[in-house]
Amino acid sequence: MSQPDDFDVDLGAYFHAVLRLWWLVVLLAVVGALAGFGATRLTTRTYTAVSAVYLGQPTDANGNAIAGLTSNPRAAVQLAQSADVLKEVVSRLNGEIKVGALRHDITVSTPAATVKSTTTPTNIVTITVTLRSAKKSAGAANALAQVLVARLGTYSSAKTDLLEQQISATQAQLAATNARLATAQRQLAANGAAAATYLAVVQSASTEQQTLQTTLQADKLALLVARNVESPSVVTIASASRNAAPVRTSVVGGFVAGIVVALVIAAFTMRRRPRPGAAAA
């Protein structure tokens, strides 16, 4: 059995002890606050850089959205964190960062506000890099964004090249048709009613001209969509910002800790009175 405590805690004596050691309370509170401030300042500085990549939305020949790597943000997140992509990023940074360190210091995620459906095909991933160097963190975030865009843009790049070739061919055909039409119109005006052959050429060339103009307009619109909607792009260029250290929290915590230590010391220095029963015994 435990021995009974023959002493009662005298709150009055405790408060007197605290008042007697008020200078110690103040001193330890100040020391604690200074210790918290110093610990915060001595903490290693880190810098965070954030870039954002629009993944794009592939479409078919009729302009309908189709499934692909760029239409799946989770696949893009996994691709950005793959060893192959990280090695290419390190190569672009001339080996200033190791692959292992980069893998540990990056976070690739999809913003919570991003909604993927057939009616809102908006795909965005954010790349966050936290390093001890502002230059390296920003460089790594931007390099990773550029590599990701290059890896995801193969389909849209091929489609853009094909549309540009089609537009060039259509423009050449349209120029030839316009020249033939102009020549036939001049011959028709010069020969009058006797130039039935030239009239047929004018009618045929006019029909072909309208068809080519419609085709050219459709191809230009498709090229515009391929460049601005289907193609991945970097929408936010990263710039490093220093991570704010919790100075206020550390100072307040040290201040409170100093007061607690002083109160404990006051409790040990106070005099406790014996219980009445113990004194009678």
Image: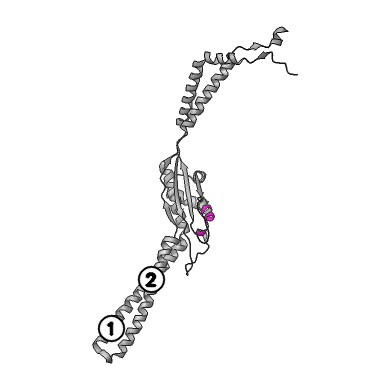
Looking at the rendered image, the quarter that the N terminus falls into is top right
Residue 9 badge: none
The furthest residue to the bottom:
194
Task: Examine the structure image and report whether residue 90 is included in the region drawn in magenta.
Answer: no
Could you say where residue 52 lies in the image, as x and y percent from the top left?
Answer: 45, 51
Between 248 and 16, which is closer to the camera in this rendering? 16
Q: Which residue corresponds to mark 2?
A: 217
Q: Which residue is painted at 53% across and 25% down in the image?
A: 257
Looking at the rendered image, the quarter that the C terminus falls into is top right
Could you say where residue 27 lies in the image, as x and y percent from the top left?
Answer: 48, 19
Mark 2 crowdedness (10 Å alpha carbons): few <14, some 14-19, many ≥20: few
Majority secondary structure of the magenta segment? helix
Label 1 residue SS: helix
Could you say where residue 185 lies in the image, as x and y percent from the top left?
Answer: 28, 83
> Over which residues does the magenta segment extend?
70-77
The furthest residue to the left:
190
